[in-house]
Amino acid sequence: MKRAVTVALAAIALLAVGAIFGLRGTPAPPEPAAAIARTDRLEQTVTQARQRLRTLPRDHRTWAQLGLAYVEQARVSADPSRYPMAEEALRRSLAVRPRDNPDAQVGLGALANARHDFTAARGHAQAALRVNPYSSDAYGVLADAETQLGRPAAASAAVQRMLDLRPGLAAYARASYDLEQKGRLTEATALMRRALAAAVDPADIAFCRNQLGDLAWFRGDLTGAAAEYEAGLAAAPDYHPLLRGRARVSAATGNVDAAVADLRAVTARTPTPETLMEYAETLRLAGRAEEAARQLTLAAAAHQLFVANGGRDELTAAQLALATGDPHKAVTAATTEWRRRPFAEVADVLAQALHTTGQDKAALPYAQQATAASPQNAAYAYHKALIALSLGDHESARADLRRARTLNPHFSPVDGPNAARALAALESRR
């Protein structure tokens, strides 16, 4: 169960929304009871915006607010059918005021990020900044886009501008994630501690605790991760990312039934392709293959719904193809995604797909790029080791397996033990 880039993006991409339309921005969707208040506020925002637009149909700011509210509703509910509604509202804002309309451009950028059209998101953020070069929200959208486009220097520069303009939870979260991607986990954790110290709202506290838990798990610190997840659940008992984190710890420690129960709750509330695939993996671990297959079918349907509503995500298509035993389809999908955005996770999935089809020489450069871009990722090191083994390079395989075990021996409840066995087999040959 890897720490997914898409989840990180979803957690931080839309922090600007609340600031623009008058709500307190929460960086990940809260659940009942926190979600009830958040959902009610969003619905109230939508209702009020619609009422105002019936009276003032040329109010470009309110059209932008309505569009952003729809984007946020889609994120909270994992319902991409809100995306076309968001686009219509944001385009109406631009139709009313084609120029000097940074609110609409930021909204369109946030929508593009949500749909994984990161090139478009970058363009909208840059358009907003040409009008208002001091927009922290625009820099946040830009940072998210540049990160996913595999442009770490540009992403870091955007994050720094955001920190300079408006230091706070939104900026700290992005800065922490930026450092995490570079393998600077101690500094990433310190920034999230600063964010936690400033958090007051239960959902904000839960978000910070979840990020701290994920960072601890990423380092292989199961005790620390569990403590952060439990502290977050004490603040917001049904905050679903915390349940997902707790499930990861449960699976790593052999409590598979507890992991299944938590992931069942998560997928009932946010049935995204990624959460459904993670649930399927855990069900397989529990020996419940038929149920796992059903979850993969649901994941494919969720992916199709995302694409039908304007999303672009060949990475998920590749992951689904690997999970369902179609590696050649995975190669095609991952190659398409890599051409669109040369990001570390895409390189890793493409390497896995090529390896599974026996194309290890072609896979190796992508695995090398993934580990170079994300040097603290144990899963990437393990996947590179498998490729080296297939190529007969036992020394490189041994080094990568040792690295994976050192970074995080619990990176996967399936592949973690596999890595230990493979390393033991190699060491026995010396």
Image (tube, rainbow, N blue to C red):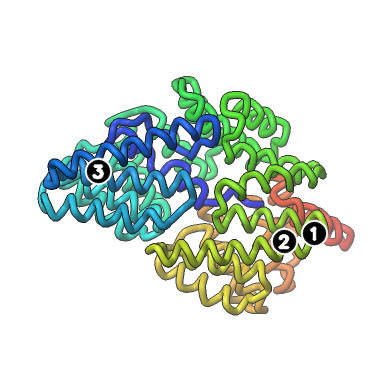
Give the camera-side residue of 410 and 325: 325
Q: Which residue is mark 1?
A: 288
Instruction: Look at discs 3 and 2 and give the one toward the viewer.
Output: 3
Tag 3's secondary structure? helix
Q: Position of residue 19 (x, y in %)?
A: 30, 33
Residue type at numbered disc 2:
Ala
In the rendered structure, the answer to whether residue 173 lies left or right of residue 260 reads: left
Q: Position of residue 393 (x, y in %)?
A: 72, 69
Task: Categorize mark 3 by other alpha carbons within 10 Å: few (<14), some (14-19), many (20+).
Answer: some
Residue type at numbered disc 3:
Arg
Q: Position of residue 150 (x, y in %)?
A: 42, 57
Tag 1's secondary structure? loop
In the rendered structure, the answer to whether residue 89 lies left or right of residue 413 reads: left
- Which label was assigned to residue 50? 3
Q: Residue at image x 14%, y 46%?
A: 57
Tag 2's secondary structure? helix
Q: Residue at image x 56%, y 75%?
A: 331
- Which label was assigned to residue 292? 2
Give the camera-side residue of 255 and 364: 255
Q: Position of residue 247 (x, y in %)?
A: 70, 42
- Which label was assigned to residue 172? none
